[in-house]
């Protein structure tokens, strides 16, 4: 019966007609690369983040790499991060020549455990990259107290946290470097893209250099290159999509929070005890509900694959997994990380599954996804 319903993906972007028209205008305008649309998008983002400088880029990965470069992080330095993230979070540390150090996660929030962060600090530690998994921030007061005490820079991997807040303050409006991604699945998407919130005009100028070959211009034909930059600028085509998406961000966040509440209502208070599964932290104030993730009851190797296959084959419902532990990837095992180092990350990395959650989803979709989960997990 359920299989007759159309496939329900775990994520799907919503692009309105006004945005499609705005992209058409850019394509007809004669100016495709970084120009007036990028400037307008950056101005709106800066206002949204309380007037802090914001620069856009072509991914939410180069944003973090550039933040590390601006902070002067390089060979000989250690950067503490989480293993439960998209691999970009740790790759950027290696990319700048520094050493990633993984701290285990908190089993309830599934974010980096700040006690473990403190324990991992050495004289070589230069920065922390916390990840706000599914849009749920870490304890930001504690994070910045640790950073201040040990004189560390922070690059917030807020890729999933556009629209999230911490006790009434918007993520991005305070703190050190804050990096957002606009990749296709994110709450605000430009297809691919990202932005970095910076502390001051000097950092912003440096960010501009790093994103475009290190170039600085002056006068009519003045040009110089004094740092090694790359090619990371956002196009006006992309920025037009961002402006169109930005107009809906409050509605998107509110709708996702309502869908998350509906998931909890559908699962009911008995779900965890009856199935052995674990629901996410029920936070409807801070989190933007980028993802709705449950931890499956452990039936040994293959638990998640079997669950995901049944969701798709029997109920036509898509699922995802965010994420496989980074420290167990070959590249990282070759750098000395081994199984058993981060028990909480390893368990959650094996059993976490992402249920459908996106702006165009309806209450009926939530009911359908929750019913499928319950049918599979309830004996
Ligand atoms: C999406 C994402 C990234 C990378 O962003 P891109 O724009 O794809 O480069 C990094 N970290 C996390 C946690 C993400 O979800």
Image (tube, rainbow, N blue to C red):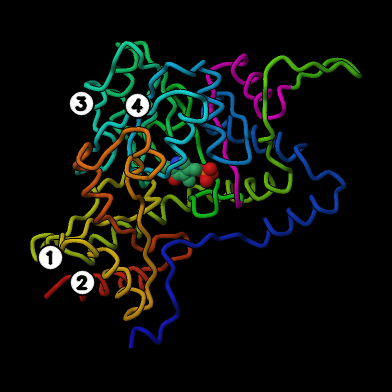
How far across and down, in percent of the image, does residue 155 sit? 44, 26
Q: How much space separates mark 1 and mark 2, taking CA atoms?
A: 8 Å
Q: Name the residue under label 3.
A: 115
Q: How much space separates mark 1 and mark 4, taking CA atoms?
A: 35 Å
Image vertical order of residue 51 relative to residue 300, above or below: above
**Is tag 2's residue or tag 4's residue first in the polypeptide sequence?**
4
Identify the disc placed on residue 80. 4
How far across and down, in percent of the image, does residue 103 sit? 27, 31
Q: Name the residue under label 1.
A: 275
**Mark 1 in CB contact with mark 2 (< 8 angstroms):** yes
**Is tag 4's residue or tag 3's residue first in the polypeptide sequence?**
4
Given the current orientation, which residue lies at the most extreme left position? Answer: 273
Please tell me which residue is depicted at 75% across the width and 22% down the height of the picture.
215
* Residue numbers of the magenta segment: 191-214
Front label number (1 vs 4): 4
**Is tag 1's residue or tag 2's residue first in the polypeptide sequence?**
1
Q: How many labels does the image show?
A: 4
Q: Mark 2 points at which residue?
A: 374
Packing grade of label 1 (10 A; few <14, some 14-19, many >=20) is some
Packing grade of label 2 (10 A; few <14, some 14-19, many >=20) is some
Front label number (2 vs 4): 4
């Amino acid at each position: 019966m359920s299989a007759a319903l159309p496939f329900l993906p775990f994520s799907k972007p919503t692009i309105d007609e006004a945005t499609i028209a705005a992209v058409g205008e850019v394509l007809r305008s004669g100016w495709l690369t970084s120009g007036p649309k990028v400037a307008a998008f950056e101005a709106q983002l800066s206002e949204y983040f309380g007037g802090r400088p914001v620069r856009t880029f072509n991914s939410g990965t180069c944003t973090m790499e550039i933040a590390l470069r601006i902070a002067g992080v390089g060979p000989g330095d250690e950067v503490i991060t989480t293993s439960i993230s998209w691999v970009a979070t740790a790759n950027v540390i290696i990319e700048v020549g520094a050493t990633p150090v993984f701290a285990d996660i908190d089993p309830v929030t599934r974010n980096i455990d700040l006690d473990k962060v403190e324990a991992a600090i050495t004289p070589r530690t230069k920065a922390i990259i916390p990840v706000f998994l599914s849009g749920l921030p870490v304890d930001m007061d504690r994070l910045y107290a640790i950073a201040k005490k040990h004189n560390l820079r922070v690059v917030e991997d807020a890729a999933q946290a556009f629209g999230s807040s911490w006790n009434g303050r918007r993520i991005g409006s305070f703190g050190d470097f804050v990096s957002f991604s606009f990749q296709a699945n994110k709450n605000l998407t430009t297809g691919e893209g990202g932005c970095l919130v910076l502390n001051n005009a000097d950092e912003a100028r440096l960010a501009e250099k790093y994103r475009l070959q290190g170039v600085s211009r002056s006068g009519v034909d003045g040009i110089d290159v004094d740092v090694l930059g790359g090619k990371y600028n956002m196009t006006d085509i992309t920025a037009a999509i961002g402006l169109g998406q930005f107009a809906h961000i409050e509605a998107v966040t509110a709708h996702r929070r309502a869908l998350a509440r509906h998931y909890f209502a559908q699962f009911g208070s008995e779900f965890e005890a009856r199935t052995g599964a674990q629901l996410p932290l029920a936070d409807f104030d801070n989190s933007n509900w980028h993802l709705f993730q449950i931890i499956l009851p452990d039936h040994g190797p293959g638990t998640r694959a079997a669950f995901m296959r049944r969701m798709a084959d029997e109920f036509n419902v898509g699922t995802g997994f965010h994420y496989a532990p980074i420290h167990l990837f070959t590249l990282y095992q070759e750098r000395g990380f081994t199984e058993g180092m981060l028990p909480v990350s390893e368990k959650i990395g094996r059993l976490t599954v992402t249920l459908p959650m996106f702006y165009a989803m309806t209450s009926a979709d939530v009911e359908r996804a929750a019913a499928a989960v319950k049918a599979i997990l309830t004996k």
